[in-house]
Every structure is written in structure tokens, then in C-alpha cells.
Amino acid sequence: MIEDKNPQRTQLSDLGEFGLIDHLTKNFKITKSSTVKGIGDDAAVLNFENKQVVVTTDLLIEGVHFDLSYMPLKHLGYKAVIVNLSDVYAMNAVATQVTISIAVSNRFPLEALEDLYAGIETAASIYNIDVVGGDTTSSNKGLLISVTAIGEVAADDVVYRSGAQPNDLLVVSGDLGAAYMGLQILEREKEVFKVNPNNQPDLEIYTYLIERQLKPEARKDIIKLLKDLDVKPTAMIDISDGLSSEIIHLCKQSQVGCDLYEAKIPLDPQVIAACEEFNIDSTTIALNGGEDYELLFTISQKDFPKIKANPSLTVIGFMKDASAGIDLVTRAETKIPIKAQGWKSITD
Amino acid sequence: MIEDKNPQRTQLSDLGEFGLIDHLTKNFKITKSSTVKGIGDDAAVLNFENKQVVVTTDLLIEGVHFDLSYMPLKHLGYKAVIVNLSDVYAMNAVATQVTISIAVSNRFPLEALEDLYAGIETAASIYNIDVVGGDTTSSNKGLLISVTAIGEVAADDVVYRSGAQPNDLLVVSGDLGAAYMGLQILEREKEVFKVNPNNQPDLEIYTYLIERQLKPEARKDIIKLLKDLDVKPTAMIDISDGLSSEIIHLCKQSQVGCDLYEAKIPLDPQVIAACEEFNIDSTTIALNGGEDYELLFTISQKDFPKIKANPSLTVIGFMKDASAGIDLVTRAETKIPIKAQGWKSITD
């Protein structure tokens, strides 16, 4: 569970600030035609020609957003990129570049930052983006990472949160709640480890949950799939805080209401099993657990035949007039108003 | 000296994350034609048509980059924007948008963040840029601000650090060392305050120094001036870490050498007086003091007549072959190799 202590430790101060940036970024390659100039000047220079540019940014802080006692630094670097790319895809755009700023206290040796950047490089390679800039500085406590992601999209293809219409269908990619249950498993094992450091936990049965927490993926594939299926969502958002708060964002910005069908919410069998083990209601977890980074979108009913056979997409609801409210339709066919309760409220 | 304690304190938890963002950003107006969509979706959407896009990012951390005991939050918000805009101007670009991410511990009431955002808004208004996104989260220690600035520039107008040629002239805007001496004054007054809180310091004679530290400006005016004078620098960088390290960056990336003339370095009379008072060599301060946010650039000799009469610009050196080295030519006409020693080295 606990991060390996690398036997070789190089003090950051041995390199100096400029040496550190050069060292950490020396493996990054520029592959996008839109990157004119990457790392190494006052700013990166990009060229999107006739495309629109999408920009989003996120801050990840040790002790708030991640716990290094079970989050390996390589995974953290990967995840820091992924959570930002997810926002780019949620605009129906293609991610092209990121900038990475980190602040580290001197408790981190160079080798730890190399692991972090290895994860960043892996994400950049898999998602085909360039790392074009950033900032490396010291912090007086812990590690923090600030990522800005940039993407491109044809003006006609942008999908906002605000375009949903009454009678549209509400669709979600993948399944929900696994990342949150993965966090519960990791937190529990951390407590067990504190009591008995020699205990070797068997986490085999939770593999999917832990992977969803430690190595989430952004749904670039869904953006491509929708294009291939010739479906342009009417509204879209990524699920970072939890299904309930994202539905409320979509409904408020689109000025519509929604019926969400409890029975339709896609859950992985491991989520159902873990919820039973922890004695938590799986619908509550799907609604309020965060960090799934799935895409939530609405489509016109005429597009339903194009998506209905696809195993990656599930219709979970139906958009209504705003006056009809935002409701969960339970398995017992009763309606309960959906409240905004992101995962931060759960864990705080 | 010490930040006013606002009698009204609103706990951040009273608003919730989404309420907080809405509250802090409600006064931000979108004025740039390149901003298609600002705050409020998964990402901002921008449109630069046939212009190239410039992107730069910086992280400011309490206790490392600023000290709230003498830095009012409004000034901090202003400065956080300015330091990033300075990097955009150093590409010979026009700044158009910023994103702002902040992390705050719960020791900050809402009113403190309102002050911070008032400074951000003032900078956005004066420099004519849009605030198009960001992230607000909690930190477990202190305040940190991450800013990403975006600008636009015609492909032919971009100026890199790498274009300087032997025989080019080295030019600097404004004067140097004042921000660093302002920091020395503020640090000294903080120590005096600790010993005698009733002491009313007379800081009148240091006004310029303190203003350069607490309310720096980015040289947008110089970019316009150069355009008006029809001068395109061959290379350019902004002076954030100190003249010596910026000269070394320019020389290394351009593969040239340089003679820097000590007698030509522009110093404000307040810098000279304060250096005498503190018994420090003013050339050392000009070379190694940071945060002046002036522009350092090289021009072809043929452009010298266009700039020579301008009080905002000073020719301070002469570019040579790389083999000739990077030297300070002292008032005594001796040559001393210039070493990279940014302001971080001084204050650490």
C-alpha cells in the first residue's frame, strides 16, 4: 500500500529551478501540429487556425484531493492530467495541450518528481497531447499540482451545458460509483495498515474499484464514438462531483427539468458488492460519489436508434419542462427531488 | 502595515463551492471578441481566428512568493494577474484572457477573497482581459493562486528568446532593482512592527520602491510602443528573476554572447538611496533582484535611431559571438563573467 521509498535520493536543491524543469521535461516530445513552441520560452505558442480553443484548469492539493499514502506519484501525475482532459472532452472537443505547474516541499527527492512526471508523460502519450509549459516552485507544505488543458473544436461542434431541451434523453457513459467505492477500500486498508503493518490485504476482488480511483480515464473514446455515430449531444458535462450535482448543473443551465430512473443507473457488480459490504445504498453512491469522469449528456430522441445498441452508453433519464422539477424515479416508482450533494460534501 | 481585519466575516462554508465561484466572479464582464464562452461550463471557449495563441502559467504560494503581513489581498490579486501578463507581452503578444485557480484554508473569510478578486478584476479591467475560468478549492495551509494567461499574436510578430544575433543591441524598459529594494523595506518594517506595534513608519521616501513590490505593472505599453515605432525585437524575455539570469537565458537560447555595461543599467534614485542605506551594491541588486517585470530585448542596430530618444528604453549592452562569453563591463572597464543568480537564490 505504502509508496516505495526509493533508495536513491537526489535533493531538489542540487539541480536548481531551471535545471529541475529541464530535467523533468526532457522526455516530453512535441507531436501536435497545433504546437508551434512548447516549453522553454516566456509562453507556449499555439496555432489553431480556424478551430475554436477550449481552456480548462484544475488544482490538486495533497491532503485535500489526494493522499500519497495510497496514491503512487506516477498515478497522481496521470490522474492530474486526466481530470482536466475530461473537461475538454465534455465540450465535445479534442484535447491538444496541457501546462503543468507543481509546488513541492523539500521532503520530495528528485526521484519522486520523476515518478510524477512519468505519469504525466504516460497520460500525454496515451491521450496524444503535448505538454507545452508550466512552473516548478517550492511549497512550504506538501505537493500541489495545477494543470491547464487546452483543446480544439470546430465552432459547430461545441456542446455546452445549456442546450438540453424537454423530451431529450439523458445518457451516461460507462458506470458510476466505482471511484468512490475504490476510495473507501483504500481508506479502510490504510487504517488496517496503521494497526498491523504486516497485514497483506487481498484487494483482488476490488481491482476495478481501486483502478477507477487510482487510474481514472477520460472518455476521449466517447467523443470519437459520438462523431462516428453522427450524434451531437444537445448538452454535455463530465461527472467529476457526482451524478446528482451534474444533473442539476445541466438542468439549471438548460432551464429544463428531468426524471432520472434509479433502475437505469449503470453499476458495476463490484460496486454493488462493495456497497453491500460497506452497508451503503448503491444509488446514493452513484448519485453522490465523485471522480468517475464519465460523460453525462442529452440527445434528441431522434438520435436514440443510433446509440441504443452501444454497451458504453446508457439512457438513464428524460428531460422535462423546468416547472416539472428534477426528480429521481425510484424502483418503487416514487419521485424524490434530486439535491446537489457533490462528493466533497460526503468526504468532508 | 498589517492587513485590516474586516469586522464582518462570512465563513466560506456558508456558500458552498459553486456558490463561492458564482459570488466571486459575478462582477467579471466579458469584453473580448475572442471570448466565445467564459466562466460557467466545463471549459472556456475562445476564438482566435487567424492569430496564434500564447499560453503561460504561474503559481503563487503564501510564504514562498508573498507574505500577507504586508501584502494586501487586493494587491496580491492584481500582482498574480500581472506576473502572467508580463510573460504574454514578452512574446510580443496581446493578452486576452486569464483563468484563476485559488486554494484557501478556512482561516480566510469570504470578505478576504472578495478583496483578492477585486484586485484581479482591477487588473483585468486595466489590461483589458477577460477572466474566463478557474477553480476554487480548499487548502490545508494558507493561500495559493494559480493563473494561466492567454494572448494572441500574428504569426509574423511572435518574438522568442532565441532570435538575438551578434551585434544586436540589448535594451531594457524602465528601471531595475526597485521591487527587490521595496521588499527589503517591507521586511524591515515588519521586524520593527514586531518589536513595537505602535511605531508609525514613515515610508514616504520609499513610495516608488514599495509600489514596485506591491503593485507591479506589466509592460503592455512597451509592446504598443515598439509597434508604433515599427521595431520588432530579435529576441525578448521579461525580467522576473533578475537581469543576470534573464540575459543568460537570452544568450543561451540565441547562442550568442553579450557585453552588459554596468554604467548603463537604469536605476531609480530611490533604489540608489536605499542601496546606500542598506549598504548593498546597487549593481548587484539590479542584476539579481527580481520581480521588476520589465522587458529585456535585443534589436538590430539599424533600429537604434527609432528607439534612442525614448525615455522608457535604455540600451544596456551589445550582443557578441557565443565564444566571447557573457560579461559585465564594469565602470572601471574590467570584464566580469555574469553568473545566473535569480532572486530566489538571494532570498532563500
Image (cartoon, coloured by chain):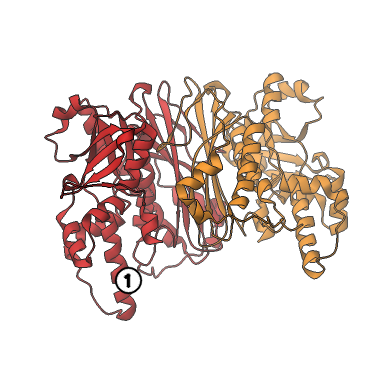
Chain colours: A orange, B red
Chain that bears disc 1: B
Residue B117, x across and y down, in percent: 40, 52
Relative placement, left or right, of B308 versus B75 is: left
Asked which quadrant contains residue A346, the reply is bottom right
Tell me what residue is drawn at x 39 percent, y 34 percent. B253
Closer to the camera in the image, A198 or B248 = B248
**Which quadrant is home to the N terminus of chain A?**
bottom right
Q: Residue furthest left?
A: B309
Closer to the camera in the image, B223 or A254 = B223
Asked which quadrant contains residue A191, the reply is bottom right
Q: Can residue B304 be seen in this view?
A: yes
Q: Residues within 10 Å of mark 1 (few under 14, many from 20)?
A: some
Relative placement, left or right, of A253 versus B294 is: right
Relative placement, left or right, of A141 versus B326 is: right
Residue A286, x across and y down, in percent: 76, 47
Q: How many marks?
A: 1
Tell me what residue is drawn at x 31 percent, y 53 percent. B288
User: Would you place residue B201 above or below residue A251 in this image?
Assistant: below
Q: Can residue B146 be seen in this view?
A: no
Q: Mark 1 points at which residue?
A: B190
Tell me what residue is drawn at x 29 percent, y 49 percent. B292
Q: Is mark 1 on a helix, strand or loop?
A: helix
Residue B77, x across and y down, in percent: 38, 53
Tell me what residue is drawn at x 67 percent, y 57 percent. A67
User: Would you place residue B215 above or below residue B253 in this image?
Assistant: below
Closer to the camera in the image, B36 or B299 = B299
Relative placement, left or right, of A81 versus B86 is: right
* Amino acid identity at mark 1: Lys
Residue A42, x across and y down, in percent: 40, 38
**Which quadrant is home to the C terminus of chain A?**
bottom right
